[in-house]
Image (tube, coloured by chain):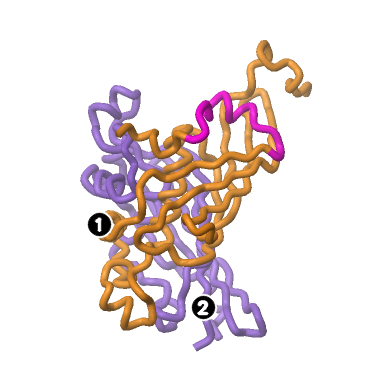
Amino acid sequence: MISPELIGTCVAAGTVLIERSRLRLFAAAVGLREPVYLDAEAARAAGYPDLLVPPTFCFTLETDLPGRRPIPQVLGVAPERVLHGEQEIEWVNDAFAGQAVTVDSRITGIESRKGGAIELVERRTDVIHADGRPVAHLRNVVVVKRG
Amino acid sequence: MSWWSSVAEPDGLDIAALSRLVPGDSFVLRDDEPVTRLALALYAGGSGDHHPMHVDSDFARAHGMDDVIAHGMYTYARMLRMVTGRWSQRALKRCRVRFTSPVRVGARLTLHATTQSVVTTPAEHEVTLSVTLSDANGATKLSGEMVLACPPPQFETNPSQRKHP
């Protein structure tokens, strides 16, 4: 049983600089071939200040934050009990290489299902530009199997 | 190979086609390359998710799997790439999915989308789709809902769809 007191716990928070080389590696991995994701010159020719950040890159930003704790560790459960259940993104404003964005990720819900056989843990993450405009709002649900 | 070959079916699904979708309309987008070990290794580095279940076959076998499986977020990114490759990421507003079953090395992914609703305002045309991603055997890998937006249909070319305020 995961303690409901964990609702509100911060999983990761801080500012991340978006790096060109990391964006290129990410784009190559997921098969993004449009030049705006790979070539800064092409991105500028398309009217962008630098390489365009693909929306799904936002899910990776928190892994670079110092002090970030993996979800099983925050919940105090063995990693093999945790499955990825749901994922949601609301995309609001584009972001670009060279920008620093703030990331704030918190546990927002814990729910028992199937007579306690599984628990659903919801986490929400906001990615925000330096001027306060949102980049994206993310929502993640993990399924924790009874140990 | 050009980048848009991944989403070349059916022809003519351009931004104007997005604005013409009506509830019940369906379309299919096929990924043009299978999931590979190399891609999963690159994704581990690019995403910072170094869980061994996605890159280390020995670890996967020791934990009851036949082989490594794709990161859930890798699969999600491949799905969104099919959509943004077709309409650019300017079209994306929201996407929410549930992960249904693991994606294995060699999987060829197909996105099935059905239009649920459309809302037109003077500023934009918003299309809500129900989506499922399946492999070549028809097994569902993830399912959910996606909301795309594009400029509203032109009054001159499509007066019947004009919404009066």
- Chain shown purple: that is A
Q: Residues within 10 Å of mark 1 (few under 14, many from 20)?
A: few
Question: Dots 2 and 1: beta carbons under 8 Å?
Answer: no
Which residue corresponds to the image point at 42% horizontal and 58% vertical from the top-left?
B73
Q: Looking at the image, which residue sits at the far bottom?
A: A147
Vertical order, B139 against A30 (above or below)? below
Kindly indicate the quadrant of the structure image that contains residue B17. Answer: top right
> Could you tell me the amino acid type at mark 1?
Leu
Residue B22 drawn in magenta: yes
Residue in the foreground of this view, choosing between B80 and B1: B1
- Chain shown orange: that is B
Residue in the foreground of this view, choosing between B49 and B83: B83
The circle on residue A23 is none
Q: Looking at the image, which residue sits at the far left?
A: A21
Vertical order, B75 against B10 (above or below)? below
Task: Give the labeled residue for mark 1.
Answer: B38
Q: Are marks 2 and 1 on the same chain?
A: no
Residue in the foreground of this view, choosing between A102 and B154: B154
Please state the horizontal and vertical placement of residue B87, each as a whole percent of the image.
48, 32
Q: Looking at the image, which residue sits at the far front?
A: B137
Task: Give the labeled residue for mark 2.
Answer: A144
Please state the horizontal and vertical placement of residue B77, each as a whole percent of the image.
41, 50
Magenta part of the chain: B9-24
Relative placement, left or right, of B118 versus B61 is right
Label 2: chain letter: A
Label 1: chain letter: B
Vertical order, A77 against A99 (above or below)? below
